[in-house]
Amino acid sequence: MSPPILLTVDDDPEVSRSLARDLRQRYGEEYRIRRAESGRAALEAVKELKLRDEQVALLLADHRMPEMTGVEFLEQARRFYPKARRVLLTAYADTDAAIAAINRADVHYYLLKPWDPPNEKLYPVLDDLLDDWKAHDRIKSDERLRVVGHRWSAPSHAVKDFLTRSQLPFKWLELERDAEAERLLDAHGGDAEHLPLVITEDGTVLQGPSPGEVAAALGVASRASQNFYDLIVIGGGPAGLGAAVYGASEGLRTVLVERDAIGGQAGQSTRIENYLGFPSGIAGSDLARRADAQARRFGAEMVLTSDVSSLDVCGSARVVRLGNGDELSAHAVLLTTGVAYRTLHAPGIEELTGAGVYYGAAASEARSCENEDVYIVGGANSAGQAAVFLSRMARSVTLLVRGPN
């Protein structure tokens, strides 16, 4: 497969050549650099690339161009490459227009001209955007982990939701919808009464596993590497991840214990618009992935799919007992257990939970909602975000709100 493309658009030939030169110097070994000198020419190039089934990782356009502005180009190019990272190049006087473009064209970032020195003003931004693009491209293209399940199977939903929230690439194969699902179930002697059937990259077959068993098969740490730490953080939401970053960056031996997937309730959000430092918004799973990588870079340890059963004091140490029987001790324990969704109290709801009734599962259940009528109980932020997200696939989305507004 040919390397992905970085496409630049600027009507000033000198600026266009300079930008292409800087991009080639940094990214030339991994990407192909293409440039255009008008918005219309760039849009034609995008259409041609789409016809050839080429990958485009980045679209970088100058704001002030005749006939078609950079914002107009990015807005139209988005239809052909919605996953490409979009960057607007602008002068300081046009920053208001650039900020408006974040909403209009879903621009990921804007850069000010001039960008010298590129090591400080260009490359750090593009490095981050391209790393983000590669992470999403990996999730989309790597489907060597296969999960056979049924849409009305609560255990299937639990595994699918864990993998989705953890951003672990997998191929979901639904019985009664995907022919391959039946073939795999028969080939591996699976039982439709005990779903899901999980087949890992190395051929390991798991029948009816829990999320923790799937995590273990994939090499996700569910046990700590040592018995004593300076800091134990219980809970893997934004607060816990932040504590892990701060503790580990100060040289403390830090371990974070999370009973499910990293990210907490925020990690289940399809879009967070008001998180500091992300002007174009960020998906909760992306925020969790970035924070996880940051904490690990400083040396923090992550122990996932592990419940904490008790907390005790032994002399100057705090002792944390896990559900699997392990004991961890530390000088300090920080509780960042966050919140949980309020549950519905209605006859029969427990039997349907995970099998038609879901809590915060818009991302993992989106495909199952295609051309279906979806009802969302609640009227706050999470409900609104889920409604916007699911409306792209569902036949209809109805909010059921208890209050008058």
Image (cartoon, rainbow, N blue to C red):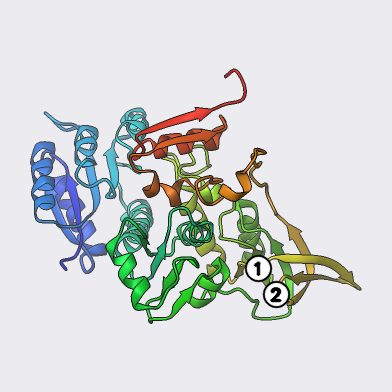
Image quadrant in which the C terminus is located: top right
Q: Mark 1 or 2 closer to N-term?
A: 1
Quadrant of image for the N terminus: bottom left
Residue at disc 1, secondary structure: loop
Question: Where does the image place residue 189, in percent across and percent down from the top left?
Answer: 40, 78
Classify 10 Å Cα crowding around label 1: few (below 14), some (14-19), many (20 and above): some
Frontmost residue, 362 versus 381: 362
Q: Nearer the viewer, residue 203 or 234?
A: 203
What is the CA distance from the residue labelled 1 to the residue labelled 2? 7 Å
186 w.r.t. 380: above or below:
below
Q: In the rendering, which numbered label is found on residue 306?
A: 1
Amino acid bearing label 2: Asn
Q: Amino acid at mark 1?
A: Ser
Q: Nearer the viewer, residue 164 or 106?
A: 164
Residue drawn at point x = 62 percent, y = 65 percent:
249
Q: Element type at marker 2? A: loop
Is there a contact, CB below 8 Å, between mark 1 and mark 2?
yes
Residue 142 visible, this orientation: no
Q: Residue at x 62, y 22 (%)?
A: 403
Decide: few, some or many residues near mark 2? Use Cα within 10 Å; few <14, some 14-19, many ≥20.
few
Q: Seen in the image, is 95 located left or right of residue 357?
A: left
Asked if residue 352 is positioned above or below residue 71 in the image, the reply reads below
Left or right side of 99 for 312: right
Reply above or below: 376 against 46: above
For residue 47, which quarter of the picture? top left
Q: Is residue 309 visible?
A: yes
Q: Residue at x 8, y 43 (%)?
A: 44
Q: Position of residue 178 (x, y in %)?
A: 30, 59
Count of all numbered marks drawn on residues in the image: 2
Left or right of 195? Residue 238 is: right
Query: Residue tagged by mark 2?
Result: 324
